[in-house]
Image: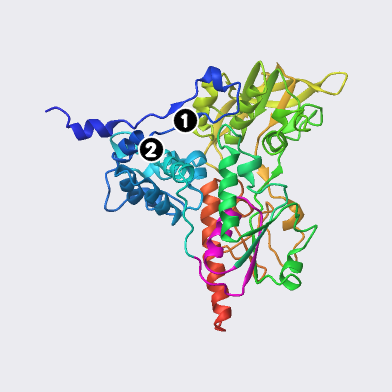
Amino acid sequence: MGESATNTQRRQRVPMREQDPAVRVRNFQEVPLGYTEEEARAEAARCLQCKRPSCVQGCPVNVEIPAFLRLVAEGRFAEAARRIKQRNALPAVCGRVCPQESQCEKHCVLGKRFEPVAIGRCERFVADFERENGLVQFPEKAPPNGKKVAVIGAGPAGLTVAGDLILLGYEVTIFEAFHRPGGVLIYGIPEFRLPKGIVEKEVEYLAALGVRIELNQIIGKTLTIDELLDEEGFDAVFIGVGAGLPMFLGIEGEDLGGVYSANEYLTRINLMKAYRFPEFDTPVVRGRRVCVIGGGNVAVDAARTALRLGADEVRIVYRRSRAELPARAEEIHHAEEEGVRFQLLTNPVRFLGDDRAMVRGMECLRMELGEPDASGRRSPVPVAGSEFLIETDLVIVAVGSGSNPVLAQNVPGLTLNRRGYIQTDEYGRTTKPRVWAGGDIVTGAATVIQAMGAGRIAAQDIHIELTREMADSPPRV
């Protein structure tokens, strides 16, 4: 018997149009072009509307996915966006940068037989539709309750805490170290993956709700947490400063000119607009032969950025095989379309410089995979006598990041783990009274939506605790 029309319709997801690789590699405009109304409705109609939707459990903030997809299929796009915002305050961001393939879409029942529903693409569409058509509505706020909350860091976790608490009647102030709010959304993710105008609109939305944002405020230097609590009158503090301390390889020649951490390289280009030098006075080395060390999303972002700055050749140097690459499959695909080469099973051992102390080459060892390590990935083992040289005039080290010590290590009563991250309980409570934390400063580098999920949990607990104080009842044990 032939396949039913419904099954035929559900077999393949609706493709999303993209810029041609030969064109986009020379601009910083967004690569995917988004769905049309018809495409979004067709894709949302693929949803099976499961009675027990496992996709919801795969979402760190538990968006009611079948409900919003049903609204999309019916053409009720603004309603769909508002349904998402009941759980996720940044749908236009998450629809672009969240790894849906390992979260909600991984659990899509349709994916057991066919391709899973493109949940992220539909999320992006409705968020853009609401914003672009002027249909954003402000939810009703509770009356002021007289309590003040300080949020340190204007990244995904901090923005989520601020958005949740401002609606519950709190006076909320965000303290941000940089001159623009957004955290990693602004300084880390390139324009071609997440246009900065979208992040700015999300921040403007919070400001319109009444959230105060204090920029160029390095808490731990300009103010301490104790001063916020004891002198500035804040009743609670949430720490969401991320994990922005660059990590390096610790090998010879790493101090040569032209060797960047991915953190500095991307911050110069994304936040400080080095790609528009000299219009913006932020210089950056533009290499012809570029090597990016690492295999995660940050490495891929750096490699694709280097191409857009005019490199003749860009390669990602990774010490494991393709199967172990931690970057999203979509980002790897886009990078290869654009011409990025993947130099796998390769590990740098030293950098070589010229007479001006600028990097000119990289000595590497070939690797082979041994037994799995603690993360479950097979450990790379050097192949004896396999040394070889790669010529390069720009190296970007993207092997991870750590916790910034400026704040965390200078707060009395705050317990850190052995890696320098803040220790919290399941509600985001730290060991210091009236102080909560969440996001990468607790877990290490993770996803945007996971940081938002931590922020939501912490906001709920802050509300419970401060409500209890207002009622003068005993604290939770």
Element under disc 2: loop
Residue 342 magenta? no
Q: Position of residue 51 (x, y in %)?
A: 26, 53
Q: Nearer the viewer, residue 240 or 21?
A: 21
The residue at the point 61 percent across, 75 percent down is: 146
| Above-or-below relation of 173 to 344 | below
x, y percent for residue 95: 47, 42
Residue 100 at x, y = what percent?
A: 44, 41
In this rendering, does residue 427 appear at all?
no
Nearer to us in this view, 341 or 87: 87
User: What numbered label is drawn on residue 33?
Assistant: 1
Going by the numbered disc 2, the residue's amino acid type is Ala
- Work out which quarter of the rendered image holds the C terminus and state it: bottom right
Q: Is 351 or 335 nearer to us in this picture? A: 335
The residue at the point 59 percent across, 25 percent down is 345
* Magenta stretch in the rendered image: 141-170
Horizontal relation, residue 13 to residue 260: left or right: left
- For disc 2, the marked residue is 118
x and y, in percent, of residue 474 in the image? 56, 82
Q: Are marks 2 and 1 in contact (CB under 8 Å)?
A: no
Does label 2 or label 1 sit earlier along the sequence?
1
Residue 160 counted in the magenta span:
yes
User: As drawn, is 196 to the left or to the right of 356?
Assistant: left
Q: Amino acid at mark 1?
A: Leu
Is residue 1 in sight in this rendering?
Answer: yes
